[in-house]
């Protein structure tokens, strides 16, 4: 039974946490908007987050570090960061706090933070400026609109990725209004966080201060981007209509276009990039690159981590995938087997190339994996079940401890997330920024056999991977601190 005094104490503690989180909001915003500095807590982004979201991000640290972080601990670190002269970078406040408590508790906090962020300091008398890279979205479907939302949310000083235009086929007299409305409202991901207005005379959508030119064209090579002040642009083809070099090269014939990104698996000699796994394969002279598929992005980082530690001999990947726009709402003709059956009413067995596509990012996996897929009546968030034979024996606890470490303290942190919630279901992962989330309570291991369940938001998580890839292509990836090794 809780006493009146205990009730009051809990309420006072909560109010103090709210006050500290409220103090963090403007600091986080100014650092990002004016100086291009991103902040996070144990991998959870703080930029454009509200007070409750910030408190929840601190509580998430329990799953990773085994103990909850507090805004009372991170706010002093954030204030120190604000006073420092730093180049654009990513600072994980949670990691700094944990590192200080565990390894450097005898060092004054301010001295510790200055030492940890020494590599990001701007030499006296110098400044950091940047114009950013123009981005054009060719197609404005599910992935296109989520890419737009993400770029509009990440608008630091210099805006490394500047959304300049979308290219679509005119859908009717009110096309511009409909495009803006689809950006504003989303049945899965909720309403757009910001303001949107439409300039009919100039075919422009204004979203959170960004003027997005809407260009109507019937083919990729029918646009002169320089007429709109766009140059050296990265064109992101979200249509999936062209997947080989010949088809995608049409974009490069447009004045103002410099590079092409395909948001689908590429064919032929096109490199399929999974960030965190083979992004070192990106060369400066690559003019066309593929971001592979959502499923390939979800499973490949986890497979790499497991292969590095335990050695993957063979395996089978079963994907339980949300239905997509290429299926029918009701039974009707479809060129693909079974996909013509009503998507909201059926579990639909279908094929997936994700298992074979892993070898495009990890060539030594060639021939090691088989795969199958089931489309299910949910609109978003999917799951991959990895049934693996390993070279080295492992228990479920050991495997989970390793993947928990990967989720926070490795180069795959942005790709691999981790949950130990006994109540987790698919809708809990809508909006997840990770490529895949390991469901640790479902992990099974018996000697050299292991089964790992990986959730993934096949829309938002994949879109974040595409953004990371574009940042890597234009050399705009922020250095992350603290540096772990």
Image (cartoon, rainbow, N blue to C red):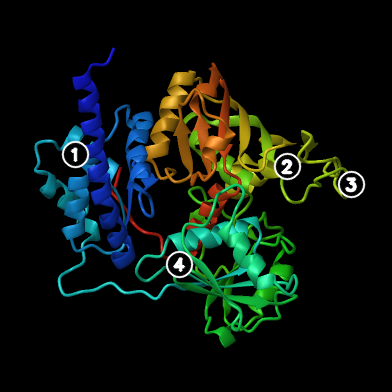
CB within 8 Å, label 2 to label 4: no
Q: Is residue 341 above or below residue 152?
A: above
Q: Position of residue 330 (x, y in %)?
A: 84, 44
> Which residue is pictured at 18% across the width and 68% down the height?
123
How far apart are labels 1 and 4 at the CA level? 37 Å
C-alpha span from label 4 to label 3: 41 Å
Q: Which mark is residue 332?
A: 3
Q: Which residue lies under the disc numbered 1?
A: 100
Mark 3 surroundings: few (<14), some (14-19) or many (≥20) residues within 10 A:
few
Residue 150: x, y in percent? 49, 58
Above or below 448: residue 242: below
- N-terminal-most mark, 4 or 3: 4
Whole-number angstrom distance, CA of label 2 to CA of label 4: 38 Å
Q: Residues within 10 Å of mark 4 (few under 14, many from 20)?
A: some
In the depicted view, which residue is nearer to us: 298 or 75? Answer: 75
Horizontally, residue 392 falls left or right of residue 238, namely left
Q: Quadrant of residue 132?
A: bottom left
Image position, residue 242 (x, y; %) = 73, 64
- Determine the CA span between mark 1 and mark 3: 61 Å
Quickly name the residue at label 2.
352
Residue hosting label 4: 208
Q: Secondary structure at mark 2?
A: loop
Residue lying at the far bottom in this picture: please name it.
227
Locate residue 379, reporting x and y percent. Answer: 66, 43
């Amino acid at each position: 039974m809780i006493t009146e005094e205990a009730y009051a104490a809990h309420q006072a503690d909560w109010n103090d946490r709210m006050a500290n989180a409220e103090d963090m909001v403007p600091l986080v915003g100014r650092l990002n908007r004016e100086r291009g500095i991103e902040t996070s807590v144990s991998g959870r982004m703080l930029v454009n987050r509200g007070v409750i979201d910030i408190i929840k991000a601190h509580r998430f640290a329990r799953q990773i570090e085994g103990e909850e972080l507090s805004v009372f601990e991170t706010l002093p670190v954030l204030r120190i960061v604000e006073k420092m002269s730093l180049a654009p970078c990513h600072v994980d406040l949670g990691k700094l706090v944990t590192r200080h408590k565990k390894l450097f508790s005898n060092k004054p906090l301010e001295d510790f933070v200055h030492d940890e962020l020494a590599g990001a300091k701007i030499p006296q008398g110098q400044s950091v400026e940047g114009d950013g890279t123009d981005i054009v979205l060719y197609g404005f479907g599910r992935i296109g609109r989520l890419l737009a939302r993400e770029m509009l949310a990440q608008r630091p000083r210099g805006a490394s990725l500047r959304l300049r235009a979308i290219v679509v086929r005119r859908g009717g007299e009110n096309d511009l209004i409909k495009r803006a409305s689809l950006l504003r409202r989303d049945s899965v991901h909720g309403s757009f966080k910001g303001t949107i207005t439409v300039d009919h005379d100039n075919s422009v959508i204004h979203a959170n201060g960004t003027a997005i030119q809407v260009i109507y064209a019937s083919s990729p090579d029918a646009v002169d981007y320089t007429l709109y002040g766009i140059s050296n642009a990265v064109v992101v083809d979200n249509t999936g209509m062209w997947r080989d070099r010949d088809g995608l090269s049409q974009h490069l014939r447009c004045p103002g276009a410099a590079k092409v990104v395909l948001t689908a698996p590429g064919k032929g000699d096109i490199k399929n990039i999974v960030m965190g796994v083979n992004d070192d394969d990106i060369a400066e002279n690559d003019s066309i690159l593929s971001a592979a598929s959502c499923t390939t992005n979800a499973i490949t980082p986890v497979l790499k981590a497991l292969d590095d530690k335990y050695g993957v001999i063979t395996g089978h990947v079963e994907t339980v995938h949300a239905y997509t726009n290429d299926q029918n709402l009701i039974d009707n003709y479809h060129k693909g087997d079974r996909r013509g059956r009503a998507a909201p009413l059926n579990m639909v067995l279908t094929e997936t190339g994700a298992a074979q596509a892993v070898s495009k990012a990890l060539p030594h996996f060639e021939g090691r994996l088989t795969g199958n897929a089931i489309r299910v009546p949910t609109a978003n968030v999917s799951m991959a079940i990895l049934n693996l034979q390993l070279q080295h024996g492992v228990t479920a606890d050991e495997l989970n401890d390793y993947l928990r470490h990967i989720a926070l303290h490795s180069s795959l942190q942005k790709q691999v997330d981790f949950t130990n919630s006994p109540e987790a279901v698919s809708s809990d992962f809508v909006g997840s920024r990770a490529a895949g989330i390991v469901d640790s309570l479902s992990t099974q291991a018996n000697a050299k056999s292991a089964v790992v369940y990986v959730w993934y938001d096949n829309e938002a998580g994949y879109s974040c991977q595409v953004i990371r890839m574009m940042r890597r292509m234009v050399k705009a990836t922020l250095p992350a601190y603290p540096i772990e090794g």
